Image (cartoon, rainbow, N blue to C red):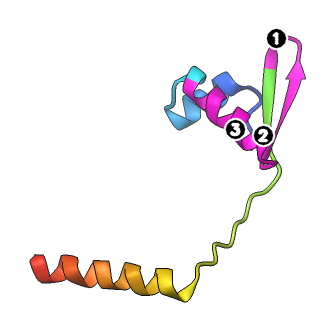
Amino acid sequence: MASETIAELSGLSGRKPSNLSTTLKTLNRHGFVRLEKNGKNVKPIALFTDFEIKIEQDITDRIMKACSKGKEAA
């Protein structure tokens, strides 16, 4: 179920409304969220719900190397 207001989403997420509003405005600028005004309220609408993250092999190699260093130290 989608949140009807930023205040409602704030309660669900545990984030302060002002911080959440800033994040939603950033996501809106980048095309991930639409902010629909309804009087004094703003309804956040997610434009995407599924994401696939692709990374280059050199980044994967660096992550794996860093993870194995952490295991050696433990």
Residue at 51% across, 30% down: 15
Residue at 80% across, 23% down: 42
Residue 70: x, y in percent? 20, 76
Magenta stretch holds residue 26: yes
Q: Which is in the foreground here, disc 2 or disc 1?
A: 2
Apparent side of residue 60 relative to residue 17 in the rendered image (left or right): left
- Residues in magenta? 19-41
Tell me if residue 24 comes above or below residue 21 in the rendering.
below
Of the image marks 2 and 1, the number of the one nearer the N terminus: 2
Tell me if residue 21 comes above or below residue 68 in the rendering.
above
For label 3, the SS is helix
For label 1, the SS is loop
Residue highlighted by disc 1: 40
Residue at 79% across, 56% down: 48
Residue 19: x, y in percent? 56, 27
Q: Amino acid at mark 2?
A: Asn
Magenta stretch holds residue 22: yes
Q: Amino acid at mark 1?
A: Lys
Of the image marks 1 and 3, the number of the one nearer the N terminus: 3
Residue highlighted by disc 3: 26
Apparent side of residue 41 relative to residue 24 in the rendered image (left or right): right
Residue farthest front in this picture: 58
Dot 3 crowding, Cα within 10 Å, few <14, some 14–19, many 20+: few
Inter-mark Cα distance, 2 to 1: 18 Å
Q: Amino acid at mark 3?
A: Thr
Inter-mark Cα distance, 1 to 3: 20 Å
Q: Verify CB contact (< 8 Å) between mark 1 and mark 3.
A: no
Residue highlighted by disc 2: 28
